Amino acid sequence: MIFIIGGAYQGKLEYAKGKYSLSSGQIFTCTEDKNIEFGLRCIYNIQEYTLYCVRNGIDALKVFKEKHDAWQDSILICEDIFCGVVPLGKDMRDWRDMTGKLCSYLSSEAESVTRIFCGLEQKLK
């Protein structure tokens, strides 16, 4: 699995499309109102899935562990929301915590981890 992280609007998806020749049909974009479909080559905006999980009492980390085989050959992309100012609202703090824990797990499982900053690649693993 390839894991890509970075801040908002830093070029994560554009980087992945170029580096891994992804077409739009190969990308599942998570939203805060539905479950992940693990069947596509790239799963984008994982932080939106963790928000969905927080709001629906689902443990995102448990889901990813249970579906381990389904995403092993995927490119996973998540926005870095777990650094910086701690949110005031409990649900937003829970979202940040869950996203951070999931990203730590995914990083440990990944073949490679790349951070994108200002469109530039920074290899972490």
Image (tube, rainbow, N blue to C red):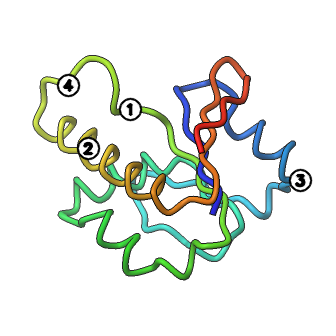
Residue 81 — which label? 1
Seen in the picture, residue 102 relative to 122 is either above or below; the reply is: below
Seen in the picture, residue 90 relative to 41 is either above or below; the reply is: above
Q: Label 2 amino acid?
A: Trp
For numbered disc 4, what is the local secondary structure?
loop
Mark 2, Cα crowd under 10 Å, few <14 / some 14-19 / many 20+, is many
User: Which quadrant would residue 84 be assigned to in this image?
Assistant: top left
Q: Residue 101: x, y in percent? A: 30, 50
Residue corresponding to mark 3: 21
Query: Of label 3 and label 1, which has the lower sequence position?
Result: 3
Q: Label 1 amino acid?
A: Ile
Query: Of label 4 and label 1, which has the lower sequence position?
Result: 1
Q: Residue 98: x, y in percent? A: 27, 49
Q: CA distance from mark 2 to mark 1?
A: 9 Å
Mark 4, Cα crowd under 10 Å, few <14 / some 14-19 / many 20+, is few
For numbered disc 3, what is the local secondary structure?
loop
Q: CA distance from mark 2 to mark 4?
A: 10 Å
Q: CA distance from mark 4 to mark 3?
A: 36 Å
- Quadrant holding the N terminus: bottom right
- Quadrant holding the C terminus: top right
